[in-house]
Image (tube, rainbow, N blue to C red):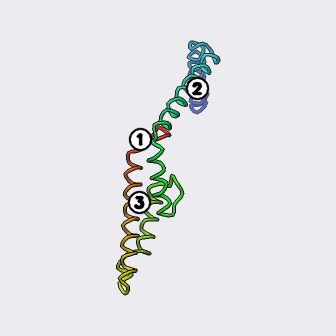
Amino acid sequence: MSSWQNRLRDVARERLNRLQDRVAAVEAQGGLQGVAERLFERLEQREQELWERARALDPEEVARVRRWYARLELEFGAGDAEVKQAYLRLMRLYHPDRFTRSPEDEQLATRLSQELTMAHEGIQRWLARRPRLDGSR
């Protein structure tokens, strides 16, 4: 036998041994039925944790954050990058320095820019501290 045939035989034996080890491990855990039951138990626990986290959100706070998203002309739940992009776009549009000819327009632009800044900062704070429903972070 050549060296590549020996190597091929060795690789096949290693894979067969690993497969046999996996089968033995599954059988030690009560067979496939036992593994499936434990998997479903873990899934049910995870689902319960997610529901508890979702119930922990304050409805008034969520309503306030929804208004902030609407102020920035975004869908609720938009990510950090989308929020920043919308904020910058609207600030370019309503910045008070663009409305210096009329004092009334400048006051309106100042008020709008303050609202945009408040909405942007509020969303940023909320994104930083809100409980993650997907469990990441």
Q: Residues within 10 Å of mark 2 (few under 14, many from 20)?
A: few
Left or right of 10, for residue 80: left
Mark 3 or 1, closer to the camera: 3
Where residue 82 appears, as percent x and y from the top left, is 48, 60
Q: Residue at x 51, y 34 (%)?
A: 50
Q: CA distance from mark 3 to mark 1?
A: 24 Å
The answer to whether the residue labelled 3 contacts the one labelled 1, judged by CB atoms less than 8 Å apart, is no
Q: Residues within 10 Å of mark 3 (few under 14, many from 20)?
A: many
Mark 2 or 1, closer to the camera: 1
| SS of the residue under disc 1 | loop
Mark 2 or 3, closer to the camera: 3
What number is the disc on residue 119?
A: 3
Q: What amino acid is at disc 3? A: Ala
What number is the disc on residue 137?
A: 1
The quadrant of the image that shows the C terminus is: top left
Residue matched to label 2: 15
Q: Residue at x 36, y 67 (%)?
A: 114
How many discs appear? 3
Of residues 110 and 52, the one drawn nearer to the viewer in this rendering: 110
The image quadrant that residue 109 belongs to is bottom left
Of residues 126 and 27, the one drawn nearer to the viewer in this rendering: 126
| SS of the residue under disc 3 | helix
Of residues 34 and 126, the one drawn nearer to the viewer in this rendering: 126
Where residue 116 appears, as percent x and y from the top left, is 41, 65
Residue 85 against residue 128 in the figure, above or below: below
- Residue that extends furthest to the bottom in the rendered view of this protein: 101
Q: Residue at x 41, y 60 (%)?
A: 119
Pointer 2 or 3: first along the chain = 2
Q: What amino acid is at disc 1? A: Arg
Where residue 105 appears, as percent x and y from the top left, is 40, 80
